[in-house]
Every structure is written in structure tokens, then in C-alpha cells.
Amino acid sequence: MSEHAIRLTVNGRAVEARVPARLTLVDFLREALRLTGTHTGCEHGVCGACSVLLDGRPVRSCLIFAVQAEGGAVTTVEGLAPEPGAIGVLQDAFCEAHGLQCGFCTPGMLIAAEALLRATPLPSDAEIREAIAGNLCRCTGYQQIVDAIRLAAQRRAGSNLAGERHDR
Amino acid sequence: MIAEAPSPFRYIGRKRRPKEDRRFVAGSGRYVADLALPGMLHVALVASPHPAARILAVDARAALALPGVRAVVAGEELAQATDPLLSGLDIPKVRRFPLAVGQARYVGEWVAAVVAETRALAEDAAERVEVEYAPLPFVIDPEAALAPDAPPVHAEHGSNLLYRRKFVWGPVAHDFAAAPHSLSFRARWQRSATVPIETFGVVASWDAATRLLDIWASIQMPKYPDQLARALRLPGNAVRVHFDTDVGGSYGVKRGIKHSVLAAYLARKLGAPVRLVEDRLENMRGGDAHGPDRLFDVSVAFDGEGVVRSLKLRALDDAGAYAGRAPLQLGKPVGAIVGPYRIASVEYEAISVTTNKTVQEAVRGFGQSPTNFALETMMDRVARRLGIDRLELRRRNLIRREEFPYTIPSGSTYDSGDYHRVLEKALAEAGYDALLARREAARAAGRLAGIGVACCLEPSGGNSAFEPLFNPKNETTTWMESCSLKVDLSGTITAAMATSSSGQGHETLVATVVGEVLERDPDAIRVVHADSLTALPSNSPVGSRMAIMLGGAAAGAAKKLKADLVAIAAHNLGLPASALDYREGGVSVRGDAGRALSWADLVEIAHRKFHLLPPGLAPGLQAFHVWEVPTGGALPTPDGRVQMYPCYAFEAHIVYAEIDRVTGQVRLGAYAVGHDCGTMINPDIVHGMTYGGIAHGIGAALYERFRYDANGQLVSGSFMDYLMPTAHEVPEIALVDHCTPSPLTEFGQKGSGEAGYLGAPAAVASAVNDALAPLGLAVAELPMSVALLGELLATAAG
């Protein structure tokens, strides 16, 4: 199995590794870096549980290889918090609206929502549903997730510091 | 608007953040696949490509030649070392092991397990395992499976019939003869399931020195540790299941007993921790997590006013190739066989067959949702036959508030309800008159538009007495739950529950209930999941039971603790307990609040000052409570009457749908639900599960199906083919609460974990049929997929 050296940043931290060519990005994040917040649900690009930001855009980390992230900047759910032990406005809104149940799709939902809110700070409900339509959730029926993202958008818009600490 | 009575509760029923959410949004959940033990090995499975075939040989040489491959194990070896997995029925000749033994019986059945140092290596090696098969005749259709000449799935069993019993409760023949009208129809609930986003996974580790098996699993299964020990021929106390493993969704199906027995066997054989996490195809084909697959034949007798007199229901269910607990899903509906209606007599024939399909497992509602679909289709058809409005028909048949407690012909007594009021609330929330106008406008514009109605029950918190009902050798009549509680020297409270959770918010439930009883802040109460050796008896979060049963156990433990606190205070204040007031953890003399002992004082006495403890009270502050189902447990009568469930929640759904005339695609335009599950412990959690249940129900109604082709191949084994609703398909849902407290529970709570799912399929089906009615069409098959409706419309259009 051919191996390749890769360099990338993950949650702002520089990472260098040698990886097999066939290693997916999600397996690299979970197994090599032990960032287990990113989940594998279907491993064929439908469910969205493995979503991460790559250079600011949401991607399915089960559908790209680790070597393809060479030179890129990856943000996982662990990187959404403003600092270790804290949670950001978006994460806090998911708690406030109970926008989750089992938590398994949640990291992917947060990534999809983060990408949406960066591009569209005050989205309509239709835009929220469109943004998360590539992420399957079997617990919530999506309603409280939509509520959570709407709340996060409102709170961010009303805040001077988008990433301010909401550590209850 | 009438003001609601003020809540008698301090924490219960109020908006409070679930305790669990924070770790999940931080990406700090601990799911089984997140676990990495030193030296851990990985499993990949070799699956049968045939629906039925003798296994002639398994050649693992090429696989074992790959570096890093540690073992290849086939069925014969495993069957020597383990006992068959338990079945809910008395069918000893239908033997089920984690790997096929001698014969494969469905496509995807696991034939061999490959263990290697990484999952990728195990998959590489699995492709090199050569299995020689001799294909056999097979049967996929449940009715065909009952034919005398059908290919036998288990030749030793003698036929494909696993269970058949006809129950007759009340004068059915007389009532049919006396009723002026009757009608019959057939309804089909095709095979679907809850399909959690996390597949099933298990990690097993065997310690040869202590002879202890440690298990971490994404499990939601009653008596799982006991079943593991039995299959592995181990003493019960040699199996330690770590219930603090987060479970990424289940809704019934996470019952990986075969996976767990296999992983445990491999861990013990190889002397290393073994991880088996299904990939998606393994999950869909071979994970044994399909849901009910049911054919109903319904006959109903009624009078000219639309009052239903009697009902005959025949349910034929396809269990798949083996039978665990799933056939008992024909048993739960006995507890609500007439739905929310006054029907005086019932005949119910329950039939379970085996076919060459993936094994069925428990799904949310345990067979109640398909039954509700059949009952509600029946009500719609009676209304249509008589030309009576569907809502009016239901109002005439719904049990009235003043009739509770109400005993149905099959022997269950419904605790409480106000069905008419909840239906009216749902109609008001839906804006029913405006919906009617919207439908008429759409129809006038040439579109197919309909409104769906469903009134359904959620039996909850049962004692599992469908086990003796379906298998007299099994005398199960208790389905207890437990909670233990302690206050430590620092004065903080820790509660331990005895099972794992899969999103239901049990930590919040326990903290809220304990906080309510002890008048302490629930946010400061820690709730842990014990492991199976330290846990008290539990039956896992099934059957919509935890608010009732774990809530009852937690309240019971808290009340004992409170009594101890008061006893300590009484002893030290020199007064009887009846002269004291407990308030927020402190105890004071009634009428003299200055004479008091604080929480800190009482904790200090309990933990340090034996000389101040009342005689007979143990030091420390701890209590546990094991709670039986509030209506207890008794064996069924000879004619099969039995009280299984104590509490009955009710839901009324109103949904608006339009069907594209060309494609057959259904779009849901509005959705409202009236829901009464008694007192809600945490409304956000109840609402969330209800929304999610509706989404599941929409999936079962319109999209989701494990479809088999004529060759016995599963053709919807990926998320590209097994279609689940996204945020586009699930509409905004308007939920309106009502509270009829249960007289049987501590706080008036009923079950709610199956809410939404129990009515949504029926409601969506009702809307589709209302939309089709102007064309003279009717359909009683789920899912009402684009393929099904498109073809129906094309045929009708000629």
C-alpha cells in the first residue's frame, strides 16, 4: 500500500503525517488524530454525519481521501468552540432549542449550519432547511434543529463577537 | 382562551436544557466506535450472496495469508462454542447463531468473520475468503411461505409457520350478524425500519485472569447482559456491559445480540479486544434490524350511524429468516387492539412466518404503528361507505372522557384520556376550516389534494406479558426498572440508572424527578449509567416506558432519601416527623421556622455523626428503588386477555397533502398534532421525540422500504436506495399539548417515546386517500411511494 506524506491544518493546528493512499479523511481524523467528534454514518456520502469544513466549505470527509486534504485547512466539530471547554453561540443554541437527541448527526449538522451562517448570517427557514437537507437526522424530524439555527443566527446578529463565549 | 391551571411542579414540565446536549454539541459524545483499546482487532464479515444455500466449504487460506490477518471463523466453530440466541417464541428447531451454520438463509447473512489488525485489512481479507455454496429454493413472499409446498426456510422446523393464534374476545359472530353493515379490505405495511445514522457496534474484551468479559455496545435491548452470558455459556456475573456508552439512535432496533456474541467469542479466542462496527451495507443487509412486514385482512361491522360494533383483524407478519423477539410485535397491539374506539368485540388472528429475508427486529411502537394504520384505514373506509364526515365518524366512536378507566375486549384497561378534546385542539391548531378551503381551491384548480386524519394510542410502560401470551413456557409478568441515589459527604447528589440511552434524555429525566422530590437543583445532580454488574434490574428503554418506569424508580429512591433526611431531623429536633416541614433539602419545625436543620447539617450528621443518627438508620445517605409496572403483572387468561400496559397516551394528527398527477409524488403542505401523554417531565424532549416520530412515520408512509427482487436480493441496501426524509420532506409541524394525567404514575406522566410514529403513517395514508377519492381510487399499502402512486395514477388515466 503506497503511503504519502501530508501536511494540513486541523482546527488551527499544523499536522504532518504519512498516510496510506486509500485512507479517507474521516478515518484519518478519527483514527490517527483521535478527533472522534466527526462521525461515520453511511460512508457513501448521503447522511452527512462526517461533514467537516475544508478551507471553509462543508465536505463529506468519507468521500475524500486524507491525501486530498494536503495543504488544506480542516475544521471539525471540535474546532467550532472558541476555546477548549467552552462552546460557541451556535452550539449553545442547539442546547437551548434541544436541536438534537442522540447527538450522532449533530457534529455534521453543526458544520452545515456553520457554513450556512458564515455565508448567510440571517437565513430564512427555507434557507436553513436547504442548508441541512444533505444531513440526515433520525431523531428530531429537523424542527428543533431549524429552531436552533434560527436562534443562533439571531444571537450572532445581535452580538459584536460572533464567537463569543456562551459558557453556561 | 382558558388559562391553564398553574403547575404544581417546581422543575417537572418546565423548559430546562437537557443535561446531555452539551457533550454532544461539543463533539464529546462517547460512542462505541470512538473507543480505542490497546491491541484492538477489527472484524469484517463475509456475507451470503444467496437467499438460501447450503454452505459446502469455507476456504480461508488466501485470507489468512495476508499479513495482519489474525483469524477467520465460520459458523460451525461458533456453533460448537456458543448456545443459540434466544427467541421470543417456542420454536426450538429454528436455531439462530451469529454466523450461518451449514446453510445460509438470506442475502447478507454472515457466513464468516475475518479478524485483522485494521478494519481495512479485514475487508481486504474478507474478499479473499472463498465460500462454496449450493443454492436452494427460497421464498420471499409471506403468503407464499405458508403454502404447503413452499421451500422450507428451516427444514427441521417442519413449516414456515412460526406462530399462529386466533383470539376471540366477545360475541364477534353475533355482532357481525346483528350489524346492518360490514366491509372488508386488505392493507399492506411493507418492510421498513428506523435505520439509525449510527450503525450497530460492539467492542468486547476478555480478561483471562479475572474471567471477565467487558462489553461496550450501541445497545438498546432488554436483558442483554443475561442473553450474552447464556449464549456464551458464562455465568451472569462474568459479563460486564458498560451502559455509559452513548448510542447513536436506535428507536428499537439496536439489538446486536448476534454481533455481540460473535465479538465476545473472538475476543476470548484471540486474547485481544475485538471491535465489530457494521458498515452501512452490513447494517442494512445483515444487521438483522428490519421492521414489521405485515399484511392485514380487516373486516368491520357497523350500524347506519357509523358506530362500529365489531372487528376482525388478521395480521400476517414476515419475521425474516430467524426469529428473536420480533414476532412479539404481533402481541403488543393486543393491548390497544380497538385503538381509541369503543368496539365491543374483536377477533384477532396473529400469524408469524419465516421467509428468506433479513431478520426482523423491534421497531418503535413494537407493532402498534402498523396496527394503527390498519385501524385508521378502517375508520376512513367506514366513513366513506356511509358518506359520513371522517371526523364526525371518529367523534361517534371515540371513548368518552367520563368512561375511563375503560376496559377493552382484550382485557386491557385504559387509564385516562380526553380524546375528543385533543382532536378538537388538533383541528384548531391545524386551522381545519382553512385547510378545507385550501383543499377545495386546489381541487378546483385540478390538483389532487387531501386531508388526513388519524387518532391513535400509544400504550406505554408495559410488563411484557405478551411473552406468556405468545409462549406459555415463558411466564414473564414483570418488567421492572431501578434507580439508585446517594448524597455524598460534600452534599452533592449522584443518581445511577441501569441502562444505556440513545437520545431519550434519561439523565435529564432522572435529574428532574429527583430534583423535584428533593427540591434540589436538577442541574447540580449528576446522573451516571451503571455497568451491568453494579446496576440494579433494568429492562432497557423499550416500550415507551422510561418516563413511567425510570421516572417512578427515581422518584421512589428520592422519596426514601427524603424520609431518611426527615427522620434524622426529627431525631435531633426531638419532634415527630409529622411536626416538621421539608423544604429545599432542609427540615424545620412547623410554625417555628427558626428551629431547623439545613441540608448541610443533615448530610454532616449522616456521614460523620453516628451518635446523632436515629436508631436503626444506616450511616451515609443512599437509597434505591426497584419499581414494577403500576398495574402489576398477571398471566393471560385462557382466552388471551391480559393487562400489558398501564398508561395510554393519545395523539390526533391532521395533515394536508397534494399528489402530483404525473409523477405520483406526495407533498405534505401542513401538519398539526394534538398530543396527550399526561404530565411531561421535559417538554422539549417530549416535543423533539414527537417531531422525530412523525418524521419516521412520514418515511414509513411515503419513502422507506427494504425491497427484495424476485431473486431474493435486497435492492435497497444503501442510502441511495433506501430513501429517508430530509429537512425538505418533513414539513413544519404544529404540535399542541394536552394533559390528562395518568392516575397510575407518580406525577401523572405517560409514555412518549413512540409518539408521532404511532399516528403519522395512518394520517399520511389518510391524506393520500382523500386526495385520490375524487378519482374513485383507494390505496392501502405503505409506503405510498412515487412508484406505487405514479403507476396507480397512470393506470387510472388509461
Image: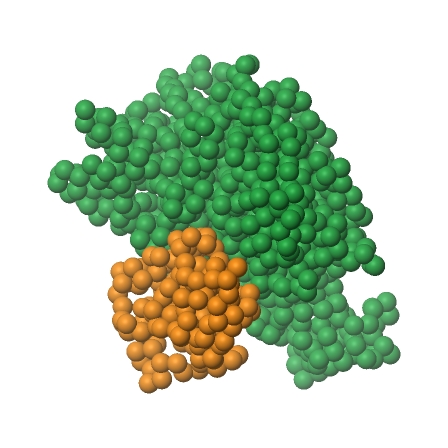
Chain colours: A orange, B green
Q: Nearer the viewer, residue B207 or B450?
A: B207
Q: Is residue B527 left or right of residue B176?
A: right
Q: Does residue B90 sit above or below B557 in this rendering? A: above
Quarter containing the N terminus of chain B: bottom left
Q: Please give the name of the residue rendered at 51% of the width and 24% of the height, measured from the top-left corner.
A: B139
Q: Is residue B65 left or right of residue B384?
A: right
Q: Does residue B94 sit above or below B35 in this rendering? A: above
- The residue sitting at the left extreme is B445
Quarter containing the C terminus of chain B: top left
Q: Nearer the viewer, residue B692 or A132?
A: A132
- How far across and how far down the image is residue B559, in percent? 68, 63
Regarding residue B608, the answer to whether it shows in the image is yes
Q: Does residue B208 sit above or below A56 in this rendering? A: above
Q: Please give the name of the residue rendered at 87% of the width and 79% of the height, measured from the top-left corner.
A: B611
Determine the image quadrant of residue B299.
top left
| Number of marks drawn | 0
Q: Please give the name of the residue rendered at 34% of the width and 69% of the height, measured from the top-left corner.
A: A57
- How far across and how far down the image is residue B292, in percent? 50, 36
Q: Does residue B594 sit above or below B271 in this rendering? A: below
Q: Is residue B431 left or right of residue B522?
A: left
Q: Nearer the viewer, residue A11 or B232?
A: A11
Determine the image quadrant of residue B159.
top right
Q: Is residue B382 left or right of residue B401?
A: left
Q: Please give the name of the residue rendered at 44% of the width and 59% of the height, measured from the top-left corner.
A: A62
- How far across and how far down the image is residue B71, in percent? 68, 48
Regarding residue B543, the answer to whether it shows in the image is no
Determine the image quadrant of residue A11.
bottom left
